Image (spheres, rainbow, N blue to C red):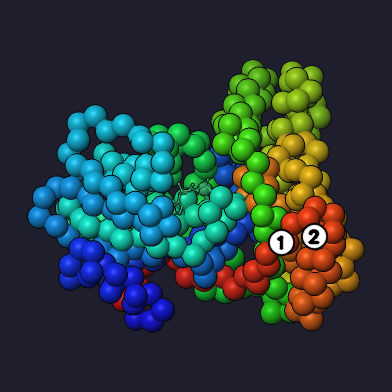
Amino acid sequence: MGARDPLIERFRQNFGGGARLYRAPGRVNLIGEHTDYNDGFVLPAALQQCTWIAAAARPEPRLRVSSLRAGETLEFALDDPDPRPRRDWSDYVRGVAIMLQRDGYRLSGADMLIDSDVPVGSGLSSSAALEVATGYALLDGASQAIDLTRLALCCQRAENEFVGMRCGVMDQFASCRGAADRVLLLDCRSLEFRLSPVDPSVRLVICNSMVHHELAGSEYNRRREQCEDGVARLKTVLPTVRALRDVTAADLVRHGALLSELVLRRCRHVVTENDRVLRAAAALEAAEVGEVGRLMNASHVSMRDDYEISCREIDILVELAGRVDGVLGARMTGGGFGGCTINLVRVEAVDRFADAVGRAYKEATGITPQFLVCRPGAGAGVAN
Ligand code: ADP
Ligand code: MG
């Protein structure tokens, strides 16, 4: 019960009674960018901001889905033998239903009303929040036992194969398994994970640049191809290498000549970023927040220069953050080409940080950024 009861009321007006309310959070990644699809390590946290779905079963094997954000209601058959993507928001919902069924789940028809307070297209993973909330609602509505890891994998497959975005598993996993006041260290190969508290002397502050460059989708998939190219070439001399996860910085120095200059830089980002994630997780657990900040700064330089996924506005935000006393580290978070930065800020410096960076960013770009002090929230579940 609580703030989202109006969604149940709205559902009652549109579809009738009997709805349950489900929620799945967006996420912010502290460090470990573009490492998940290389079988590597990531360190995200679930957000308080969520996608909410009011859902109730219906007798026919059809989904009727309505998004308040999209202002649209669509209907799909669950037993469509040849489902085609519409190339819009509903693909995330329908893709999840399809992949759950392909994974062996029997689903029931449902009416679903969707609302969300996760910023869309800002690198905070509104897409995973939508997928995971959908999957949770469909499984619960069909009285199926929910295995959160299997749910995360089905949601990732929906985005990979139905939406056409070749994302790794981080976003969906964090939305499923995040926990209040914890960051989540995830091994994206074994899917083993560990939840750790954040030192109370610091805050994770998200700064939204309010820009989103159209490149994001196509460049993301291109980066994956470049990583695969690197693995294929390194395999010729290092036969045990299955993914960049298995490559060391020393391997890249020794065998770098096998790679094009561009692919070498892409691989160097991933290899050094994996190392930074593990060191950042250890530093966080040892309350060495200064070291976490330094690793975040190094991560940004690597994304900017080697992986080339930053943009002017994001670089300005990171540079401005570095000038504020009490800011320990700053980096872009999310897939790239806009979206948000994540900043590790001493508690007493949070207001000063938002004030100084907000003003200087506006001066440099004409854009007013948005700040969000992140308190890691719980993973997906039933909300009423
Ligand atoms: P991000 O995941 O970083 O927010 P993406 O481009 O991966 O950005 O996903 C954004 C897309 O997810 C939107 O364009 C829209 O299609 C879909 N989406 C997210 N939340 C909602 C919602 N509440 N209603 C409808 N579509 C949504
Ligand atoms: Mg997304």
The residue indicated by pointer 2 is: 362
**From this viewpoint, which residue is outermost toward the left?**
59
Q: Residue 27, can we see it? A: yes
The type of residue carrying mark 1 is Pro
Q: Residue 176, can we see it? A: no
Q: Judge from the rendering whether residue 369 lies leftward or rightward of residue 136; answer left or right.
A: right
- Residue at the location (88% across, 71% down)? 325
Q: In this view, does 272 lie above or below 177?
A: above
Q: Judge from the rendering whether residue 108 lies leftward or rightward of residue 245; answer left or right.
A: left
Q: Where is residue 195 in the image (x, y as percent from the top left)?
A: 55, 66
Q: Do the residues labelled 2 and 1 touch (CB within 8 Å)?
A: yes
Q: Is residue 306 above or below residue 148?
A: above
How many residues crowd mark 1 within 10 Å: few (<14), some (14–19), many (20+)? some
Q: Judge from the rendering whether residue 327 lies leftward or rightward of residue 65; answer left or right.
A: right
- Residue at the location (33% across, 70% down)? 7
Query: Residue 369: which numbered mark, if any?
Result: 1
- Residue at the location (34% across, 51% down)? 72
How many residues crowd mark 2 within 10 Å: few (<14), some (14–19), many (20+)? few
Q: Identify which residue, 184 or 13, lies in the foreground.
A: 13
Q: Position of residue 328 (x, y in %)?
A: 81, 66
Q: In which quarter of the image is residue 357?
A: bottom right
